[in-house]
Image (cartoon, rainbow, N blue to C red):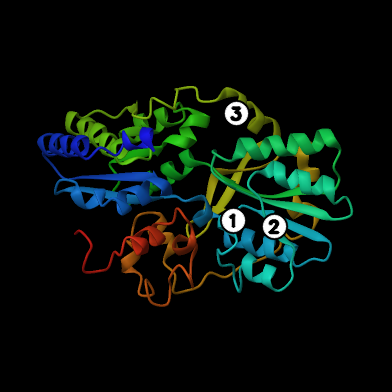
């Protein structure tokens, strides 16, 4: 833990907070896009330590949370089919669909397997040529390169029993949609460092210029976030709207061009539905024509599934930062990590889960 400790130094944290107090002369509202950043902010109590007037708005950067309900129901329809092995990362198994979840299906006999990389799913397909192996491919730009490489590897092996149920989403269109909403309160963004490690930050430059909002590429440790907030506040105070890179130890402007090339080879941009938010133009990835044979939704004809959200869940408002988890009447009672109504309560990056784990209540929240 030696190197992580360097980014959790209490003395440096106090210095950054003191500098924020000296710098901020007006109230500012800053959105952290990434769910991992949300968990650090809430777990460490950073949002409560910020100077009065600086408010963090928690954004839609939890890949599990924004995966459409229809995608989960399609995954469960596939898992229930005889002869199908449904593979997924573990954080998807307890996310509720319309009536159940993948973990419950597995308990009832469906062959649902947790994998740690998409290459594990390819290996399973090689080991079980008599079975259809489907990988549930979700996430932001962070996971897309590995999923693209798995498709390329399966194509080289000539695997006819491997496919993906793809539900990739892209960060810049979501930021644009938020900023174009008339009720948007966001004045600056902390961009997710791991996404930018893949994509760089060129895509954010026109957003910052067009909407006049600072964008700071930020890491995930307490000092990363405090410095990111300070950099954003300095821009706001000075009337600047630029893209700055706090996460210089991991991110370069051009990103990882080899990873981007793999993504472009396998995927193409498409409109994508976001759970609780709705369809956003050009906000997702799908398999392009050359690799459509690996598209599980088309191979198994499950594209017509129509899901119904729980009417009590306010996940969409939480994901866009319009509401806090504790604004939900079911929070902590009818909706808990053990029995979640919506994805933000069960996901390791969900805002509701972060608030619940930190013991946040209506009375204990900052104003």
* Residues packed near mark 3 inside 10 Å, few (<14), some (14 to 19) or many (20 plus): some
Residue at the far front: name it. Answer: 2
**In the drawing, what numbered circle is on residue 299?**
none
- Mark 3 or mark 2: name the one nearer the start of the chain: 2
Q: Indicate which label's residue lies in the foreground, 3 or 2.
A: 2
Task: Kindly identify the residue that appears in the image at 46 percent across and 38 percent down.
Answer: 172
Q: Nearer the viewer, residue 126 or 363?
A: 126
Q: Can you give x and y, in whole percent of width and height, for residue 226 in the image?
A: 26, 38
* Residues packed near mark 2 inside 10 Å, few (<14), some (14 to 19) or many (20 plus): some
308 on left or right of 302:
left
Q: Can you identify the residue that label 2 sits on?
A: 113
- Mark 1 or mark 3: name the one nearer the start of the chain: 1
| 124 to 362, vertically: above or below | above
* Residues packed near mark 1 inside 10 Å, few (<14), some (14 to 19) or many (20 plus): some
Q: Indicate which label's residue lies in the foreground, 1 or 3.
A: 1
- Count of marks placed on residues: 3
* SS at circle 2: strand
51 on left or right of 321:
left
Q: Can you give x and y, in whole percent of width and height, for residue 6 in the image?
A: 31, 33
Cα gap from disc 3 to disc 2, whole angstroms:
28 Å
**In the drawing, what numbered circle is on residue 90?**
1
170 on left or right of 312:
right
| 203 to 21, vertically: above or below | above
Cα gap from disc 1 to disc 2, whole angstroms:
8 Å
The answer to whether any part of residue 218 appears in the image is no
Q: Can you identify the residue that label 3 sits on?
A: 260
Task: Kindly identify the residue that appears in the image at 16 percent across and 35 percent down.
Answer: 15
The answer to whether any part of residue 247 appears in the image is yes
Residue 86: name its quadrant.
Answer: bottom right
Task: Kindly identify the residue that appears in the image at 30 percent across and 41 percent down.
Answer: 222
Cα gap from disc 1 to disc 3, whole angstroms:
25 Å
């Amino acid at each position: 833990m030696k190197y992580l400790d360097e980014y959790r130094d209490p003395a440096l944290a106090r210095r950054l907070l003191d500098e924020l107090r000296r710098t901020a002369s007006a109230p500012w509202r800053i959105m952290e896009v990434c769910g991992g950043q949300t968990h650090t902010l809430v777990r460490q109590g950073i949002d409560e330590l910020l100077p009065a007037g600086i408010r963090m708005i928690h954004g839609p950067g939890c890949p599990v949370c924004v995966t459409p309900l229809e995608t989960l129901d399609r995954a469960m329809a596939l898992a229930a089919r005889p002869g199908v092995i449904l593979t997924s990362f573990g954080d998807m198994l307890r996310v509720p669909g319309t009536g159940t979840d993948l973990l419950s299906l597995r308990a009832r006999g469906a062959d649902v397997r947790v994998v740690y990389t998409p290459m594990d799913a390819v290996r399973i397909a090689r080991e079980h040529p008599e079975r259809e192996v489907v990988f549930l491919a979700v996430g932001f730009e962070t996971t897309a390169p590995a999923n693209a490489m798995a498709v390329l590897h399966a194509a080289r092996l000539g695997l006819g029993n491997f496919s993906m149920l793809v539900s990739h989403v892209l960060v810049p269109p979501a930021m644009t949609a938020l900023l174009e909403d008339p009720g948007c309160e966001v004045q600056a963004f902390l961009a997710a460092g791991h996404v930018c490690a893949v994509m760089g930050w060129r895509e954010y430059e026109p957003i910052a210029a067009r909407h006049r909002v600072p964008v700071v590429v930020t890491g995930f440790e307490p000092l990363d976030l405090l410095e990111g907030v300070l950099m954003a506040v300095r821009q706001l105070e000075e009337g600047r709207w630029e893209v700055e890179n706090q996460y210089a130890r991991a991110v370069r402007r051009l990103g990882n061009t080899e990873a981007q090339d793999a993504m472009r080879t396998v995927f193409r941009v498409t409109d994508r539905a976001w759970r609780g938010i709705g369809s956003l133009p050009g906000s997702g990835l799908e398999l392009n024509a050359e690799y459509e044979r690996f598209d599980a939704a088309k191979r198994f004809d499950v594209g017509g599934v129509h899901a119904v959200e729980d009417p009590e869940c306010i996940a969409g408002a939480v994901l866009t930062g319009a509401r806090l988890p504790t604004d939900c009447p079911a929070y902590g009672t009818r909706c808990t990590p053990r029995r979640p109504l919506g994805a933000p309560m069960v996901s390791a990056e969900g805002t509701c889960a972060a608030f619940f784990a930190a013991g946040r209540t209506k009375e204990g929240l900052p104003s």
